[in-house]
Image (tube, helix red, strand yellow):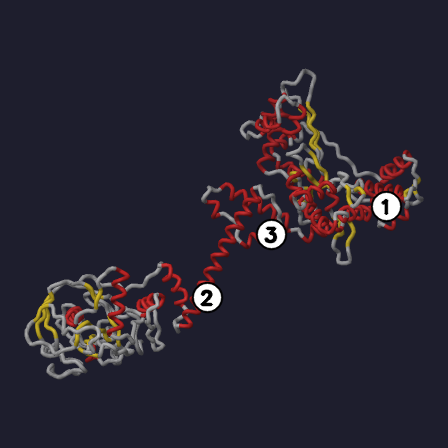
């Protein structure tokens, strides 16, 4: 505004030139230097009205620069600048926020305190203009107006608006008399102001009335103590706050008293706002702070009554909006200062958008762009959230329909997107070697096995014979889990394959070893796994299984000749531990080869067809061969949670038909030639 006024007074430089000079924080002498070349005997008188707006409207950076420019120019003896500033007395203490001017406060400053208009002055204000206009004033009207305005800080504008209303009423009836009766019917000076203001905004219709109140609210700087002040807006912003477009312009014109035709007539002389400045930089503000200030009157609840109750109550009911507007400005400014990519992470969420919901910044303003992009982001996040909820809802229905745990509803989207594919974990490479396979006297006839020539369980363990494995191989570190097998079933079902989820007996899924799977089920899983991973998995041979189970130890178990405590899960008080059925894989210590649960937990399918042991040494035995459709029995090794310690020894053998499923049978992978 200073640049604008200087450009008018000194047109040799346009407003942009002045603004460029005055805005440089490192050049506080800019104003002083610009004013020095005046002709001899000339001076510049700068009048700053409503100086308190420097504390209520200006940004801190602008306030400090304004302080430096004025103080430097006034302290310069060669600069012919004189300053007159008007300020409300309740803001005199704020000069401490202007450190440069404060230094000159007691040396260059002269005060003139404008006293409140006296009652005699108010009488003269009423009587003399009426006399000059040839009007008659009803008896008692002058004293009534003086009494009603007594003690009011806004006495002058109150009386002014009341006289204007009395004049209008007289003109309407062709009278030359100011009526006391009309004055009292309208509740005196305060009531007349409210009546005129209500009539003015009411002339805009219901929609326009709301838009007018929104604009007047936007022009108010809220103070919790009720000491509200004015807030200046650019005219373009004021039009936008009033509804935008032609309607917003119409509201601004009516409130500014610009004689817009309304319903065949014209708006009266009352103005609620004033406009100032040239097109493009024109500003709008309240005509007087009395419009938003409380009077000395109280209602029945002891709450202050405003000079204009309609606006005062509207401000009170929407008192948070000014704080929200200030917060929006801060948030938008911080957002603008971010890098281009960072701006997508500095936007408002739905919570803040609800707070800012009633604000109406111009779309092309920083605040408008900030809110627009925040809404884009919020709707995008909402759409994503709804999509996720839809996926989870479908997944929940799927888990319930398949009798699977609810946690699978969270896993299914990860499976579908390929973010999580539960495949078995393999051991380190097991080196080739030689061992005696089967039951050896003194080594394997323990845990109730008296002689090795006895048939133990369903599988014969004799004759013991030497086996040589010439190629390294790997086994699964753990038995295949329900999670891994369920992933296979889900993938097959979505391809239209007829595969079922095996029952878990109510013992749980996830990392529990899969049970109720046949030899055929295991080989089908391996075929699918090889297709998915490009690897060459298989079931272990019986010889590989026992070699890995012994882990180079010449004992019945890799840890010794007794089952012991805490080593395996079997049907005996010494080894049962805390598991009445299957234990989660990895619940017991690993063997020297890094394998878990080779003994107990679940019986594990091998690829071999069951047959008698040979008496002579063998190399890389594969067992009897048979096709997958052959009904010949297949070997099981390791025993299970339901078996006694004697059946979970390294030498223990079992066999079942390839189509059998039991809650004690699972499997483990192998790989390698």
Q: Secondary structure at mark 1?
A: helix
| Image side of residue 176 versus residue 12, left or right | right
> Which one is in front in this view, the residue at disc 2 or the one at disc 3?
2
Q: Secondary structure at mark 2?
A: helix
Answer with the quarter of the image where residue 18 lies: top right
> Which one is in front in this view, the residue at disc 1 or the one at disc 3?
3
For the question of whether residue 443 can be seen, the reply is yes
Answer with the quarter of the image where residue 533 lies: bottom left
Above or below 141: residue 492: below
> Which one is in front in this view, the residue at disc 1 or the one at disc 2?
2
Disc assigned to residue 55? none
Q: Position of residue 613 (x, y in %)?
A: 11, 77
Above or below 551: residue 39: above
Q: Secondary structure at mark 3?
A: loop
Above or below 1: residue 592: below
What's the distance in space between the residues labelled 1 and 2, CA to CA?
A: 73 Å
For the question of whether residue 307 can be seen, the reply is no
The residue pinned by badge 1 equals 147
Q: Position of residue 191 (x, y in %)?
A: 81, 49
Question: In the image shown, does 612 or 103 lie closer to the viewer?
Answer: 612
The residue pinned by badge 2 equals 393
| Image side of residue 649 versus residue 506, left or right | left
Graded by Cα atoms within 10 Å as few (under 14), some (14 to 19) or many (20 or more), the crowding at tag 1 reads few
Question: In the image shown, does 384 or 626 lie closer to the viewer?
Answer: 626
Query: Which mark is first along the chain, 3 or 1?
Result: 1
The residue pinned by badge 3 equals 357
The reply to whether discs 1 and 2 touch (Cβ–Cβ < 8 Å) is no
């Amino acid at each position: 505004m200073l640049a604008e006024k200087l450009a008018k007074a000194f047109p040799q430089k346009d407003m942009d030139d002045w603004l460029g000079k005055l805005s440089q924080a490192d050049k506080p002498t800019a104003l002083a230097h610009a004013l020095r070349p005046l002709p001899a005997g000339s001076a510049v008188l700068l009048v700053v009205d409503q100086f308190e707006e420097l504390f209520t409207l200006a940004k801190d950076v602008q306030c400090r620069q304004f302080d430096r420019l004025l103080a430097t120019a006034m302290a310069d003896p060669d600069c012919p600048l004189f300053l007159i500033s008007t300020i409300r007395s309740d803001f005199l203490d704020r000069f401490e926020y202007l450190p440069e001017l404060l230094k000159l406060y007691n040396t260059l400053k002269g005060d003139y305190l404008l006293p409140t208009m006296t009652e005699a002055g108010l009488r003269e204000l009423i009587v003399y203009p009426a006399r000059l206009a040839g009007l008659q004033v009803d008896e008692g009207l002058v004293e009534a107006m003086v009494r009603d305005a007594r003690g009011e800080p806004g006495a002058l504008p109150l009386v002014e608006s009341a006289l204007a209303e009395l004049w209008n009423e007289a003109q309407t009836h062709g009278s030359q008399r100011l009526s006391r009766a009309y004055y009292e019917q309208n509740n005196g000076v305060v009531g007349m102001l409210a009546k005129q203001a209500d009539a003015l905004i009411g002339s805009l219709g219901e929609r326009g009335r709301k838009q007018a109140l929104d604009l007047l609210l936007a022009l108010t700087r809220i103070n919790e103590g009720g000491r509200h002040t004015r807030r200046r807006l650019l005219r373009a912003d004021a039009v936008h706050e009033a509804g935008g477009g032609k309607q917003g312009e119409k509201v601004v014109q009516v409130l500014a008293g610009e004689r817009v035709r309304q319903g065949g007539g014209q708006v009266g002389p009352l103005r609620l706002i004033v406009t100032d400045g040239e097109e493009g930089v024109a500003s709008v503000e309240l005509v007087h702070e009395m419009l938003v200030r409380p009077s000395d009157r109280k209602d029945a609840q002891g709450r202050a009554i405003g000079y204009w109750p309609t606006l005062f109550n509207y401000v009170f009911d929407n008192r948070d909006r000014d704080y929200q507007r200030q917060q929006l400005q801060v948030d938008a400014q911080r957002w603008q200062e971010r890098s281009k990519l960072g701006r997508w992470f500095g936007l408002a969420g739905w919570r803040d958008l609800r707070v800012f919901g009633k604000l109406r910044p111009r779309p092309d303003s920083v605040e408008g762009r900030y809110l627009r992009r925040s809404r884009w982001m919020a709707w995008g996040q909402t759409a994503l959230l709804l999509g996720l909820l839809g996926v989870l809802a479908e997944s929940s229905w799927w888990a319930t329909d398949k009798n699977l745990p609810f946690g699978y509803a969270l896993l299914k989207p990860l499976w579908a997107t390929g973010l999580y594919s539960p495949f078995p974990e393999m051991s380190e490479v097991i080196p080739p070697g030689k061992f005696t396979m089967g039951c050896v006297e003194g080594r394997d006839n323990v845990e109730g096995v008296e002689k090795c020539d006895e048939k133990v369980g369903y599988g014969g363990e004799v004759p013991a014979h030497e086996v040589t494995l010439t190629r390294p191989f790997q086994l699964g570190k753990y038995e295949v889990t329900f999670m891994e097998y369920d992933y296979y079933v889900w993938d097959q079902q979505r391809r239209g394959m007829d595969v079922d989820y095996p029952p878990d007996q109510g013992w749980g899924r996830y990392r529990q070893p899969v049970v109720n799977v046949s030899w055929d089920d295991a080989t089908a899983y391996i075929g699918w796994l090889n297709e998915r991973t490009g690897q060459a998995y298989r079931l272990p041979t019986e010889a590989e299984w026992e070699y890995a189970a012994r882990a180079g130890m010449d004992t019945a178990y890799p840890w010794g000749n007794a089952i012991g405590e805490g080593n395996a899960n079997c049907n005996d008080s010494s080894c049962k531990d805390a598991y009445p059925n299957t234990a989660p894989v990895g619940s017991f210590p690993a063997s020297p080869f890094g394998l878990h649960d080779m003994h107990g937990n679940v019986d594990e399918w091998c690829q071999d067809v069951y047959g008698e042991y040979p008496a002579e040494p063998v190399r890389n035995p594969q067992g009897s061969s048979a096709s997958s459709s052959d009904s010949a029995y297949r070997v099981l090794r390791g025993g299970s949670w339901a078996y006694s310690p004697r059946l979970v020894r390294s030498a223990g053998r079992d066999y079942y038909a390839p189509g059998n499923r039991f809650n004690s049978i699972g499997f483990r992978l192998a790989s390698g030639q």
